[in-house]
Amino acid sequence: MLLDGKSVLVTGASRGIGRAIALACARHGADVALNYLHDRSDAESAVAEIEAMGRRAIAIEGDVADPDSATDFVAQSVHALGRVDVFVSNAGICPFHSFLDMPREVFERTMQVNLHGAYYMVQAAANRMKEQGGGGSIIAISSISALVGGEMQTHYTPTKAGVHSLMQSCAIALGRYGIRCNSILPGTIATDINKEDLSDPKKRTYMETRIPLGRLGQPDDVAGCAVFLASDLARYVTGAALLVDGGLFVNLQ
């Protein structure tokens, strides 16, 4: 029960990595607020799972691309749960597209969700943590794409590099308040965001052969790392980046 009595807020928590993090935190004793967009039934089912564990949970709809959604999410979460101990900025999109004919709306929407959304959400959570005192933990889900390029991801990789950099700077800005800021860089995790890209059996097999551990990652592989960074086990960890990729990044051969 590494998070017993803590309140955890997670964006993009109705499916994939965000949902896995929300459930893992609840299993470790946390009450959880879940941000979601459109996927009401998935969000409500996550709330039901958390409540079945004996924890409190609330699902709040909001588009992280709208700066006002950040203050609204934090305010509603605090009203329901009392405080913010851990904040996980997870919401993100990756509509694969070639570079030379990238539609402006695709580029701008990706920036607004992945980078701007993370900025305003983290800012809102940090202000609440400062006001209530006692420190806190902020975790941003970046990506291995913050470190490497992707032919169909020229709009996506800069956002994930930005999220990683945001956590480094926030670690400095917020350390005086006891607020720790870290990023997690997942490798190829099997979620809805890359389901279509990995639907080609040859590409999926190729990706698996590139990973030293021999398999694609699962959302729970990332969730366990988030629980660690959220907990007091990581009380002296801030400004760090945890690569969770099965060894993909170091496999150069």
Image (cartoon, rainbow, N blue to C red):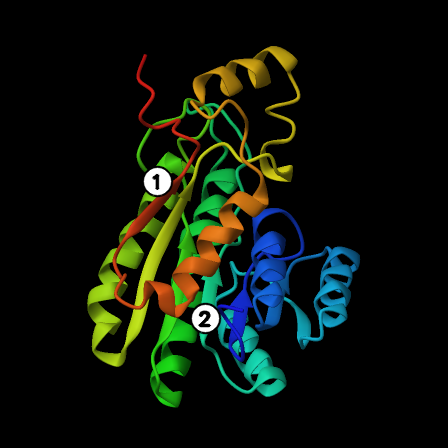
| Amino acid bearing label 2 | Val
Q: Position of residue 186 (x, y in %)?
A: 44, 40
Dot 1 or dot 2: first in sequence order is 2
Q: Which residue is mark 1?
A: 158
Depth check, front residue: 246 or 180: 246
Depth check, front residue: 100 or 215: 215
Q: Quadrant of the N terminus?
A: bottom right
SS state under label 2: strand
Give the quadrant of residue 21. bottom right
Residue 209 falls left or right of residue 147: right
- Residue at 57% x, 15% y is 205
| Amino acid bearing label 1 | Pro
Residue 86 circle label = 2
Count the marks: how many? Answer: 2
- Residue at 74% x, 63% y is 49
Badge 2 density bin: few <14, some 14–19, many ≥20, Cα 10 Å: many
Depth check, front residue: 29 or 190: 29
Q: Position of residue 163 (x, y in %)?
A: 35, 51
Asked if one can make out residue 253 in the rendered structure from this viewpoint, the answer is: yes
